Amino acid sequence: PCRARMPVLKATKEEQDDKQKEYENQPAMVVEAAKTGRAKCGVCCNKIAAEEQRVGCEAFKAGRICMGWHHAKCFFENCKVDHNTSGRGTCKVTKEAFTKGQLRLSFPITKLTSSYANMKGVEAAFPKVLE
């Protein structure tokens, strides 16, 4: 059978720059009421009911960056504070590199993965989360 190939659409440099600016202006964390009730919690894997408060964290899934959603309770139950032992990695919120021994907050992205924020990032993101 003959299979038609889909044309490859290439974005112009301007379109790529616009997408990059749009991405950079998005917050790393969001708190909102669930709009439809279709999203699943990244920690417990249960659906988040419509109008229920949820926490969104920027996540890399299936080759793209999107929001990973969590029940507020699941999110906060899985946050941990520790010290960076390796000196590697960057803050999810401020994009600053960690230094060895620096205090950081670990927060869930999925059941198995976490991201980290330095104290400056926590100050920037969590007042919005706790509103």
Image: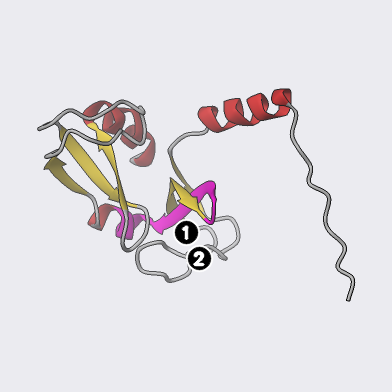
At a point 75% along the width and 28% down the height, the residue shown is: 12
The front one of 2 and 80 is 2
At a point 43% along the width and 71% down the height, the residue shown is: 46
The front one of 78 and 85 is 85
Query: Residue 100 appears in which quarter of the rendering?
Result: top left
**Whole-percent x and y of residue 102?**
14, 31
Q: Contact (CB < 8 A) between labels 2 and 1?
A: yes
Q: Specify the label residue 49 is tagged with.
A: 2
Q: Residue lying farthest front?
A: 1
Q: Amino acid at mark 2?
A: Ala
Query: Residue 28 appears in which quarter of the rendering?
Result: top left
Looking at the rendering, the stretch of residues picked out in magenta corresponds to 62-75
User: What is the secondary structure assignment of the residue under circle 1?
Assistant: loop
Q: Residue lying farthest bottom?
A: 1
Question: 21 above or below 7?
Answer: above
For disc 2, the neighbor class at 10 Å (few under 14, some 14 to 19, many from 20) is some
**Whole-percent x and y of residue 131?**
37, 38
**Whole-percent x and y of residue 92?**
35, 36
Query: Residue 87 appears in which quarter of the rendering?
Result: top left
At a point 47% along the width and 49% down the height, the residue shown is: 60
**Whole-percent x and y of residue 67?**
50, 49
Image quadrant occupied by the N terminus: bottom right
Q: Amino acid at mark 1?
A: Glu
Q: Is residue 74 left or right of residue 88?
A: right
Q: How is the image coloured?
A: secondary structure
Residue 72 magenta-drawn? Answer: yes
Question: 22 above or below 66?
Answer: above
At a point 53% along the width and 48% down the height, the residue shown is: 66
Q: Which residue is mark 1?
A: 52
Question: 31 above or below 5?
Answer: above
Residue 64 magenta-drawn? Answer: yes
